[in-house]
Image: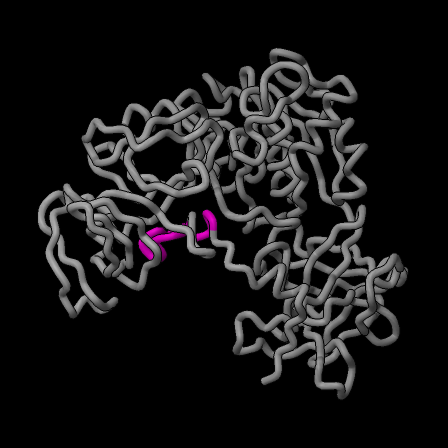
């Protein structure tokens, strides 16, 4: 099967950039530092004798060495084995080891985290010797646990290290969060309407794609499946066929085709590029943009209403692929929010706004965009937080672009439930803090907390809480600011 790979596509997609991209550390030892010859420097977790092998199947023994006298740089992993350079008794060598030599529990499912302040790392569990420190607001991956100690992989200078943090250091200084790649929009089922086609929607019919009067039926619904770097596969909710660049030279240049056996078939990958309220869809193989007319084709870059598509969630709210964006994430946590404090300390209203809209319609609003607007318009309360008035103002500023509008505030739980059941979302004001309230089910509300902790008993992954809990204590909700999705 012929697969066209342009230089541009390879440059963007083909790079093996896997930093923090693999949540299950036991499945891939180098989520932080794979590619381009990077290594993870570490000490064995076993102090006694360990075996070095000549092969990844661990069948050919080379020598036995003592773990407490060994220092290693892990290069790669294959199944339950790792390949490393190691120094033993002053001699440098290379070989294969059991993964359990370096990982306390190889099957441990990795967790993404971030430091709030500078964090101390030690070489071995329960040891005292320092193995450097992690800078404030830096990414960390927790790859193992032992009696409260956490085994972590972190960047140290231009290199990567794997060591341990104590339980007290972890509780004080490290916060979990969703470290997966941020997307221009959430996965989900959407409709597509070109700006040029008034009242028309993109419609898939078996192997063909075209325009038809808007009916929002199954043929006009497309599932967007995320690949990486804002590339998506787009397939028909009706037939399951994927929007595909036809490079055969026969028939239409854009068709609906069965999923390729090659998971990296660039003909079926589309890069989403926002243009105000619309998106351009650039095919990875052709390097050209989807063009909607009587027949669909691909055209070079350049502004044109035939290339601009309104992408709207087809089945109401973003019910499945919501996520929690946190205040302390490395991308923005240390950045100033106004003249005093940073995003981590003071931007709960800003992150709650991002969480609420993403849960509403799948559109991602970068928190720094809203933060800049808040400061410029005077909604930032220096040394404290943000005025609630920012919600109405930011909705007026960004609502048309991102497909939502502000409905106003309510103090009524019964009114809130009606809005949530109708597919709308809200921001709740609790004592000194804002949180996203995005769903109601089985008598509980789904709260997305941008600065989780013991004070409110929340997590970084969303929490279903009862109405009684939202009526007392640190979660007592005094007001709700409601949003709805628009076309």
User: Of helix, strand and loop, which mostly describes the magenta segment?
Assistant: loop
Q: Residue 382: horizontal and vertical position, in percent?
A: 66, 12
Which is more toward the observer, 78 or 157?
157
Q: Which quadrant, please, contains the N terminus?
A: bottom right
For residue 405, say whether it is visible.
yes
Residue 25 painted magenta = yes
User: Percent x, y for residue 282?
Assistant: 73, 63
Q: Position of residue 331 (x, y in %)?
A: 57, 36
**Residue 69 position in % (x across, y down):** 15, 43
Residue 477 against residue 4 in the figure, above or below:
above
Is any part of residue 238 visible from this angle?
A: no
For image coordinates 78% across by 27% down, the residue present is 393
Nearest the viewer among 208 and 78 is 78
Residue appearing at x 18%, y 48% in the figure: 88
Question: Seen in the image, is 423 located left or right of residue 276?
Answer: left
Report the label total.
0
At x 36%, y 56%, the residue is: 28
Instruction: Look at the image and give the residue range highlighted in magenta.
Output: 19-31
In the drawing, does residue 271 fall left or right of residue 96?
right
190 within the magenta span:
no
Residue 126, quarter of the rendered image: top left
Q: Answer above or below: position of 28 versus 246.
A: above
């Amino acid at each position: 099967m012929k697969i066209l790979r342009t230089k541009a596509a390879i440059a963007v997609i083909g790079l093996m950039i896997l930093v923090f991209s693999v949540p299950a550390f036991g499945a891939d030892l180098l989520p932080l530092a794979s590619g381009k010859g990077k290594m993870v420097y570490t000490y064995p977790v076993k102090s006694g004798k360990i075996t070095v092998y000549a092969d990844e199947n661990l069948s050919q023994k080379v020598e036995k060495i003592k773990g407490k006298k060994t220092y290693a740089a892990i290069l790669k992993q294959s199944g339950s084995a790792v390949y490393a350079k190691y120094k033993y008794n002053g001699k440098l060598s290379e070989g294969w080891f059991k993964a359990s030599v370096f990982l306390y529990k190889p099957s441990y499912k990795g967790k993404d985290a971030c430091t709030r302040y500078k964090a101390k790392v030690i070489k071995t569990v329960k040891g005292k010797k320092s193995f450097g420190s992690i800078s404030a607001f830096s990414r960390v991956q927790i790859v193992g646990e032992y009696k409260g100690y956490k085994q972590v992989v972190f960047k140290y200078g231009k290199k990567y290290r794997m060591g341990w943090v104590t339980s007290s250091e972890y509780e004080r200084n490290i916060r979990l969060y969703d470290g997966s790649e941020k997307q221009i929009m959430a996965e989900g089922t959407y409709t597509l309407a070109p700006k040029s086609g008034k009242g028309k929607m993109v419609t898939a019919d078996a192997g063909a794609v075209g325009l038809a009067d808007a009916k929002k039926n199954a043929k006009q619904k497309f599932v967007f499946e995320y690949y990486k770097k804002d590339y998506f596969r787009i397939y028909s909710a009706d037939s399951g066929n994927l929007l595909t660049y036809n490079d055969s030279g026969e028939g239409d240049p854009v068709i609906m085709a069965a999923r390729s056996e090659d998971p990296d078939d660039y003909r079926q990958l589309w890069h989403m590029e926002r243009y105000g309220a619309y998106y351009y869809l650039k095919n990875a193989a052709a390097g050209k943009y989807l063009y909607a007319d009587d027949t669909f084709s691909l055209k070079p870059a350049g502004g044109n209403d035939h290339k601009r598509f309104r992408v709207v969630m087809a089945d109401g709210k973003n019910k499945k692929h919501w996520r929690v964006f946190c205040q302390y994430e490395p991308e923005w946590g240390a950045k100033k929010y106004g003249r005093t404090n940073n995003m981590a300390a003071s931007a709960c209203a800003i992150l709650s706004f991002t969480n609420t809209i993403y849960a509403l319609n799948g559109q991602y609003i970068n928190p720094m965009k809203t933060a800049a607007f808040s400061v410029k318009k005077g909604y930032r309360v220096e040394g404290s937080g943000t005025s609630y008035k920012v919600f109405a103002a930011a909705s007026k500023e960004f609502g048309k672009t991102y497909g939502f509008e502000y409905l106003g505030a309510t103090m009524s739980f019964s009114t809130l439930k009606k809005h949530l059941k109708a597919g709308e979302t809200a921001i709740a004001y609790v004592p000194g803090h804002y949180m996203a309230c995005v769903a109601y089910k089985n008598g509980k509300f789904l709260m997305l907390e941008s600065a989780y902790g013991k004070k409110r008993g929340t997590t970084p992954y969303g929490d279903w809480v009862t109405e009684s809990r939202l009526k007392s204590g640190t979660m007592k909700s005094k007001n709700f600011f409601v949003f709805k999705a628009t076309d």
